[in-house]
Structures are given as C-alpha cells and as structure tokens.
Amino acid sequence: MASDKPIRVAIIGLGFGAEFIPIYQNYPGAEMYAVCRRDQKGLDECGDHYGVKARYQDYRELLKDPNVDAVHINSPIPDHAWMSIEALKAGKHVACTVPMATSVEDCRKVVEAQRASGKVYMMMETVVYSREYLFVQELHEKGELGRIQFLRGSHQQDMDGWPEYWPGLPPMWYATHCVSPCLALLGKHAESVVCHGSGRIRDDLIAKYNSPFAIETATFKIKDSDVVAEVTRSLFDTARQYRESFDATGSRKSFEWQQVEGEDPVIHTKSTPETPLSEPEIAKRAKVPDYAHRLPEGIRRFTQPAAIQDADHLSFLQGGGHGGSHPHLVHAFLSAVRGEKPPLPDAETSANWTMVGLCAHESAMNGGSRVDVPTF
C-alpha cells in the first residue's frame, strides 16, 4: 500500500467500538473515515462528537464505499463471522473483536475468505497486547523464565444484565482472552482439547444455548511442544471478582497473576544450590511496566485509563481497562495493512484460538472426550 495515502478506516459498532476512534484519529498515516451503527440517533451523536462525516446505518452500504480501506468490527458476537467474510469479499482489510465466530464451520469460512482476498484479517485480542502479557513475553524472550513447563489462563466474569445474546452463552465460546496468551507465548497452535463442565446455571439461562455448565475447565495440548495449558471460564451463577488472567510456570522463574484487582502479580524464583533462597524469598511482587514506548508517539497516552472515553463502560470496569492494549492493537493492525509485518493473530491463528474454546465446549457436552482442533 502506498505510504503517502492514509489508510481509511471504518468502525462498525459504536458502544465499545467508539473507544478506538480517537486512537485512529491520532495514528500517523491513518484516517478515521466512517462510522456505522444501526441506530441513527446513536450514529449521529458519535459522528458529531468525534467529527466523523461518513456515516452508515447499513453495513453492506458501507462496504460499497470505495474510500474504505479497512473495517474494524465491534458488533455483537453473532455478527462477527458474516461481517468479516463480506468485508474480505469486498476487498477490505478486517480487524474484528473476539471471538472470530461461534462455529468451526464459520471459522473455516473466514480463513478461506481471507486467503481468497489476500487482505489482512486480524482478531483484536486484547490480552496478547496487554502490559502484563508483554511483560511475561519479555521475561520469556530474555530467558529469565527458563524452560516453559506449564501455562494457565482464567477468565471469570459475571455477565448477568449484559445484552440479549449473552445470557446462557457457553463459557468456552468466548475463551480467547485466556487461551491466547498461552498459545502466543510459545508461538504455537493448539492440537487437541479435553474439557469438563462443572455446576449448573439457572434453567432460564440453559434454555437459550442448551449449555448447563456454570464453569468449563479445559486442558489443551500444544502442537510440537511438550507443554499443556489449562483454561477456566465462567459467565453466570459463579461468585468471583472479574479475573482475566494467565500464569506462566517456568524452570527458573514463574509469573503468577494477582489474586484480586489492585494487587501486583508475583514472580516465583527457583532456589538453586548456586543461589539458595529461603521460602519467603522465592515469591516477590512485581511491578508491571507500561509499554507505551513501543508505540508511535501520537497514540502512547491511550495505554492509560485516563485516556478512556467511556470509563463507566462495563468492559472497562470489569476488564481493568484491557491492560492498555487498545493502541497496541491499532498499531499492529495498521502495520500489517501497510505490509510492514504480519498480523498477530492472523486468520489461521485467530481461528485456532477461537476453536480451542468451541472444541472445548463440544468436549464438555460429550462428558470430557478428547476433541482434535481442526486445521484448515
């Protein structure tokens, strides 16, 4: 793509999606070109507030606009797959919030559409751009963790009172936030998964997706690796403060997520004959730095909660501001559109991260049978 022409971005879905508007507006070489929302009043309020002139109520009309280079999809979960596929077929680059889809078949269709179009598809997975993940990745790349022995993710969230498609959603259908750091750290895909469901949600919640479990816990094998990862998900009828976390257990050091919001994570260091440690010395709280310095100057401030537009939005209150990930996601996506580096995650990786959860739920519904994660 010619570097002199700005990348024109359209944002679809303006609840959570509006958070990204000022990031694109401050990104060098990008133009926040259009916004799209079904509700005209909300569309105009957002467009006026941010000074975005091109506005669409109809997504398919937006896709016909030749000025749109890339779409950033923040629509409800059931719309992710078809919207991504139609945008790719229309020759647009696609950034899509998680998950990629809610069926293995739709994941396959998105991957095929991406390959046929040659355009960028990137699932906007917040956790692998959060400061906590970047901190652990840095420790791992420096060799400080030693050999990775085990990985664990957990995403527990109370979704009572959320929009209509959430009630009763199978927990593992929305597992990318805890699956992704485990796989991204090793740069590998999941191969197979075993999952057990536990407990039971209210009958009125079960009816919608025929999924009874309060909690689903999965272990998955990682391709070409001796490491196994474990993830736990809950959405309803479970008492737990919001937790979107992962632990990396290494032979030299291990990173363990904090137990409650507001604490610092813990680094455990192995005692050795050369550097013997007493039990109290093994575990130390760690301050996680911000990684804004990796970003273009114009968008660095957006790693901080102070730059969040709607600080009362539930996903920020519960998600702790998503670990400062939003500007990193925008930077990674636009760098991929410019051809400077491949998207992370690309279409195949996004599908794998999503399908771990889809296959895990299938396993839980079949009493914990092993399910192979498809490859396309």
Image: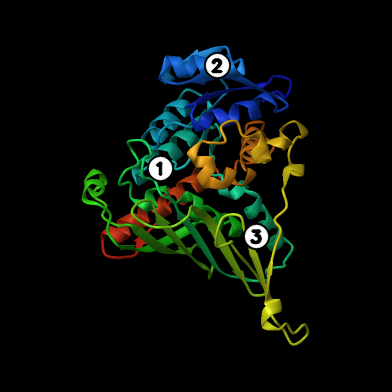
Q: Residues within 10 Å of mark 1 (few under 14, many from 20)?
A: many
Is label 1 in a helix, a strand or a loop? helix
Relative height, residue 173 to residue 33 (above, below): below
First in residue order: circle 1 vs circle 2: 2
Disc number lying in front (2 or 3): 3
Instruction: Classify residue 1 as left or right of residue 217.
Output: right
Residue in front for this viewpoint, 138 or 277: 277
Q: Residues within 10 Å of mark 2 (few under 14, many from 20)?
A: many
User: Which residue sits furthest top?
Assistant: 53
Relative height, residue 238 to residue 47 (above, below): below
Q: How is the image coloured?
A: rainbow
C-alpha gap between disc 2 and disc 3: 39 Å
The residue positioned 39% from the left and 62% from the top of the image is: 217
Is label 3 in a helix, a strand or a loop? loop
Is label 2 in a helix, a strand or a loop? helix
Which residue was labeled with disc 1? Answer: 107
Relative height, residue 329 to residue 155 (above, below): above
First in residue order: circle 2 vs circle 3: 2
Disc number lying in front (3 or 1): 3
Which residue was labeled with disc 3? Answer: 264
Locate residue 290, reporting x and y percent: 72, 48
Image quadrant in which the N terminus is located: top right
Residue in front for this viewpoint, 160 or 273: 160
Locate residue 94, reporting x and y percent: 52, 31
Q: Find out whether the residues at labels 3 and 1 contact each other: C-beta distance under 8 Å.
A: no
First in residue order: circle 3 vs circle 1: 1
Which residue was labeled with disc 2? Answer: 47
Disc number lying in front (1 or 2): 2
The residue positioned 73% from the left and 52% from the top of the image is: 289
| Three-letter code for the amino acid on which mark 2 is drawn | Gly
| Three-letter code for the amino acid on which mark 3 is drawn | Asp
